[in-house]
Image (cartoon, helix red, strand yellow):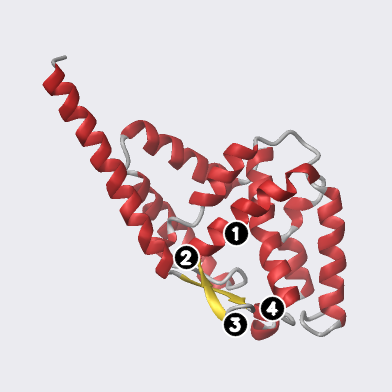
Amino acid sequence: MTHYSIRIEYTIVLMKQLDFILELDKLKAIQRKARIKSDSNRYENSAEHSWHIALTAQVLIDYAEEPVNIQRVTTMLLIHDVVEIDAGDTFAFDTVGLAEQEEKEQLAANRLFGLLPEEQSLQYRSLWQEFEDAKTADGRFAKSIDRILPLLQNMRNNGGSWAEHQVSRTQVINRNKYLEGLAPQLWTFAVEQIDLATKNGWLKD
């Protein structure tokens, strides 16, 4: 391969990577149902959420009682909501919306990760699917962190989206089930918080 050909190939790869990076900017405009109490109680966006849970995983990694690769987990958390650029965000307890969301997100994953060069495209697409499936220790820990942060936010905000949408205790317990066994101390903490929220009337019993 000539020097000129190598330069062209390098340029093509770089442009694909930059296209993907610039496309990610759209995630900042995707609004979630969680509110930021410290900022006039506004709704957070998905980019903020992704950053927050990636750092949360780094801080709480020592509570995992199975071997977990924090680098893989962090990457999963940074990319897990990228699909919302196309598919939008669906409230975690909207059972009708969630039933329709999976197909939208699969198509979005194909398009968005497909912007990258082939090797990176396959890597990120695979990590995203591993997060969705939550069958490996890395996937389950990533999923559990994605679930426990909204719990913390709602507890700090007098029930937040739980109270607003009349969510039940059972729904929140089921949503945080990935902690059980994988991070027992965090699971115990989560259940205590859920019980307190129920006692306070923020969750339906």
Q: Do the residues labelled 3 and 2 touch (CB within 8 Å)?
A: no
Q: Nearer the viewer, mark 2 or mark 4?
A: 4
Rounded to the nearest angstrom, the CA distance separating label 4 from label 1 is 20 Å
Q: Where is residue 173 in the image (x, y as percent from the top left)?
A: 77, 64
| Residue linked to disc 4 | 162
Quick one: label 4, few (<14), some, or many (20+) residues within 10 Å? Answer: many
Tell me which corner region of the image, top left, top right, bottom left or bottom right, holds residue 160: bottom right
Q: Which amino acid does label 2 sit on?
A: Glu
**What's the CA distance linking mark 3 and mark 4?**
15 Å
Density class for disc 3 (Cα within 10 Å; few <14, some 14-19, many ≥20) is few
- Residue ID for mark 3: 41
3 or 2: mark nearer the eye: 3
**Any part of residue 71 in sight:** yes
Q: Which amino acid does label 3 sit on?
A: Asn
Q: Name the residue nearer the viewer: 39 or 91.
A: 39
- Say which residue label 1 marks: 52
Mark closest to the chain's N terminus, 4 or 1:
1
Q: Is 192 situated above or below 142?
A: below
Q: What residue type is labelled 4?
A: Trp
